Amino acid sequence: MFNNLQRELERLGRTREISVPIEPDTEGYLDKECPSESCLFSFKIHDDDWSNIVRDEELICPSCGHVAPAKSWHPRAQVEAARDYALGTITNSMNKAMRADAAASKGRRNSNSFLSITLDVKGGRDAVLVPVAAAEPMRLRTACEDCGCRYSYVGAAYFCPSCGANSASHTFTQTLNTIRTATGLGETLRITLDPDEAEVMIRTLLEKAIQDTVMSFQRLNEQLYQRHCGKIARRNAFQNLDAGSDLWKEEFGHRYVDLISRTKLDQLRVYFQQRHLLAHQLGIVDQDYIDRSGDKSYAVGQRLLIRDTAVLDFADLIEELSQQLLGKLGP
C-alpha cells in the first residue's frame, strides 16, 4: 500500500543535494555577503561575471579584503530562504508519493470483498516553490579596471571581489559619490519618516559622512605613498593633515599648502578636527578641538552640529586637494 512512499523515502535517503534556483536582481546582479563575522559586508556581482570571471577558488571582500572560496559568500538571509525551498521540495515529493499510494489503493479495491481497505490522504498542502529572490539593486555600480568584473555595493569598497585590484583614485571617487548621495537624502527622510526618527537618521548620516571623507582621503594617501615611495606610512599618519603633509614634503618636496590655498587648508583642518571629535569624543567639544582647529564658534562642552552644506564643502575641498596631489605624483 505504501510502495510509492517507500521508494520516495529511499530516493531521498540517497539524495546528497537539492538544487535551489537563485535569481539575480532586475539589473542582473547576484547577492553576496562577506563570510567574515567581523565584516559581513553586503555587495553584488553581475551574474555573467560570476560565471565567466570569478574563480571558484577565491573571492575577495570589497570592504575588508577577506578571501574565501566562491561557494562561501551566500548571504545569511539567502541561506535561510534556500533551506525553506529545500524543505518545501522534500514536502512536495512526500505528498506526491502518498497521493499516488492512495490512488493505487482505491484502484485495487474489490467491490465483492467482505472487507476492503483503502488509503485516503487529506491535508498535506504542497509548498509553493519560488526561486530565492535577490535584494533590490544597490546604489553604486562599478567595474574593475583590471579584470572587468562588475560589482555593486552601498558605502565604501576598496577591492575588486574577483582579482583584488585596488585602484586608489577610483575608490576615492566612488566613496565621495556615496557621501554626496547620502548628504542629499535629508528631505526624503523627512517626508517618509517620523520627524524625530528622520532628524536622528539625518544627523547620523552627516556625521558618518565627515568620518568617511577623512577615511577615504587617508586610504588614498596611504596607497599613493606606498606606490610612489615604495614603503608603508606609519599607521594613521594621513588622518592628520600636518603629519601627512610632512611625509609628502620629505619625499617629494611638496606640502599640502603648496597644492591648495592656505584658506582652504585651514577649513580642511576644522573638518579633520571635527572628525576626530566624532570618532573619539562623541562629538563633544573640548579645549583641544578649539586650539587645534581654531574654531571659536563652539564652547567647551557643546556638541558638534554637522550641516549638509559643510559635508558637501568638505567633500569638494578634499577632492580638490587629492586631485592636486595626483597631478603632482603622476600616474
Image (cartoon, rainbow, N blue to C red):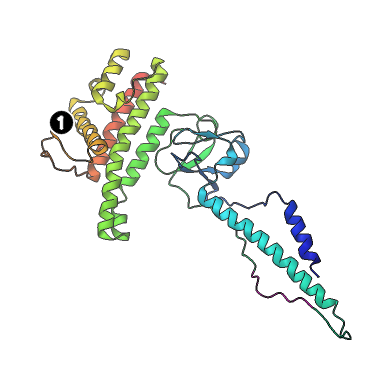
Measuring 80% from the left and 79% from the top, which residue is drawn there? 117
Q: Residues within 10 Å of mark 1 (few under 14, many from 20)?
A: few
Compared to residue 21, the image places residue 268 above or below, namely: above
> For the residue labelled by badge 1, is the local secondary structure a helix, a strand or a loop?
helix
Outermost residue on the front side: it is 115
| Residue bounds of the magenta highlight | 118-125
Quadrant into which the N terminus falls? bottom right
For residue 141, side relative to residue 28 (left or right): left
Q: Which residue is mark 1?
A: 288
Q: Is residue 124 magenta?
A: yes
Residue placed most toward the observer, 157 or 60: 60
Q: Is residue 109 magenta?
A: no
Residue placed most toward the observer, 122 or 183: 122
Measuring 31% from the left and 59% from the top, which residue is drawn there? 193
Q: Position of residue 282 (x, y in %)?
A: 23, 41
Q: Position of residue 69 (x, y in %)?
A: 58, 36
Compared to residue 34, the image places residue 291 above or below, namely: above
Q: Picture quarter containing residue 303?
A: top left
Measuring 21% from the left and 32% from the top, which residue is drawn there? 273
Quadrant into which the C terminus falls? top left
- Most common SS among magenta residues: loop
Residue placed most toward the observer, 305 or 255: 305
Q: Picture quarter containing residue 55?
A: top right
Measuring 73% from the left and 56% from the top, which residue is drawn there? 12
For residue 206, side relative to residue 145 (left or right): left
